[in-house]
Image (spheres, helix red, strand yellow):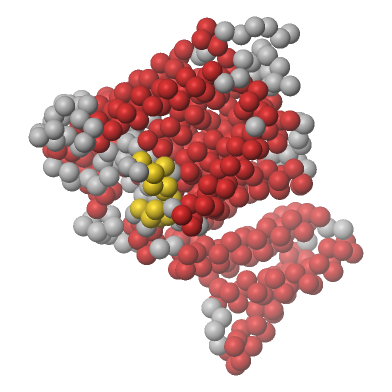
Amino acid sequence: MKRNVNIWTDIDKISILIYLLMIFAGWFNIYAAVYDEEHTRIFDISQRYGKQFIWIVAAIVIAILVMIIDSRFYYFFAYPIYGGTLLMLILVLFLGTEINGAKSWFEIGSLNLQPSEFSKVATALALSFYLGSRKRDLTSLTTFLIATGIIMFPALLIAAQPDLGTTVVFLSLFLVMFREGMSPYVFTTGVLLILLFFLSLLVNNTILSVSLILIATMVTWLMTRKTRLAVTGLGIIVAAGIVIYLINYFLIKEMSLNFIILVAVLVSGIAYGIYFFYRKAAGLIIIYLFLAGSLIFVNLVGFSMNTLLKPHQKERVEILLGFKSDPQGTGYNVNQSMISIGSGGFSGKGYLQGTQTKFKFVPAQSTDFIFCTIGEEWGFLGSLVVIGLYLGLLLRLIFLAERQRSDFSRIYGYGVVAVLFIHIVINIGMTIGLVPVIGIPLPFLSYGGSSLWGFTILLFIFLRLDASRTEYLI
């Protein structure tokens, strides 16, 4: 039953407390990260810590405004908000200011705004409206493709800037789709593709392709227990491969061995298709499609690494995987970051006492590498407290999402969790050398107005929906 709601009474105060602790902890650590003895006042707006205080005050005002707005506004205007951010993402490609090689910013006087930070909110709202408005069935191909399109459209626009880090964040929303009933086969396929991605970087692609064919052959035998069928299937690929190799050797002369294997598998699909049609072998169709898709993916990874990624991005991946060591070049940030965190020991060097921090050894230490300051000055204990706060917030948001009566609110809540989770894991992973440096901020702690405002809006829309969970959205 609908009842009158006092949002200031019903708002989740635990989440608010964690939020306030995080943003002020971020402010104090930004002060430590860029501390200047000639500008010791923490409110000095000529320095980053002074500007961050302004962003924090503005973020609190934004949070209050988000809470004042009727919760139904976010439901009924989900698509217009989504459309507006898509328009901004298109405009920034033409009218934006290029910073650090990416055309991701609108420069408005002394203020720089990054539309991609707000597009995460809009995409989570649009996905929630689409999936929650009519109880969509994600096992339906149409529903799955439309939901995927809602996620990928802004992601591709951001990739065009190019901003690889933010693009990756959008993929976290597929976790929401899995929670809402997406086929576990699709989710499993996604996990396997991630595994295949790393294997394609670690293992010679020709060896990997041959291994995949042999695995497919073995699975075929295990499913059918027909040795002749499995060997014949393998023989067709080998025969097709020999023919294509000879054509390439005498005529084309430009195809790599790995690409020859891919073409051989695709050509063999004609023979397999005839067998599948007459035998109604649905299981074998899945094996073949997975094999063909895997080989296409392996070739696309190689093409992307050599063609689409910029040289510095490719170097970061190679350094992470151990192919290359460059402690004074591309790997400098990560190397200094790990030294900084490691030097903090168990309890840290003390506030404003970090030598790595004080002498500016780590670039971007107030933004993407803010966790270094925490690790150096507050040590293992301080890092554990920060991670504990994040974990507490994520678990609290999951609890709030599960108690929602509205599908829209629940789905959006999980969208908030997914976006925050991927940011936290990747950012901290960057600072300790577990993931490539792709340049995404640590929620509520990193310096910057756009990211702080974006995360604030993302979180407080959900807290507003939760405060009104006993009301009807429609």
State the residue at coordinates (21%, 40%): 340
- Residue 155 x/y as whole percent: 55, 49
State the residue at coordinates (64%, 88%): 247
Which residue is farthest bottom?
A: 250
- Residue 332 x/y as whole percent: 24, 53
Which residue is farthest right?
A: 278
Which residue is farthest left?
A: 38
State the residue at coordinates (35%, 43%): 109
Q: Is residue 243 left or right of residue 340?
A: right
Residue 279 placement: quadrant: bottom right
Which residue is farthest front?
A: 109
State the residue at coordinates (81%, 67%): 273
Residue 473 placement: quadrant: top right
296 in relation to 332, above or below: below
5 in relation to 324, above or below: above
Q: Is residue 77 left or right of residue 53?
A: right
Quadrant of the frame with the N terminus: top right
Q: Is residue 400 visible?
A: no
Quadrant of the frame with the C terminus: top right
Q: Is residue 138 left or right of residue 379?
A: right
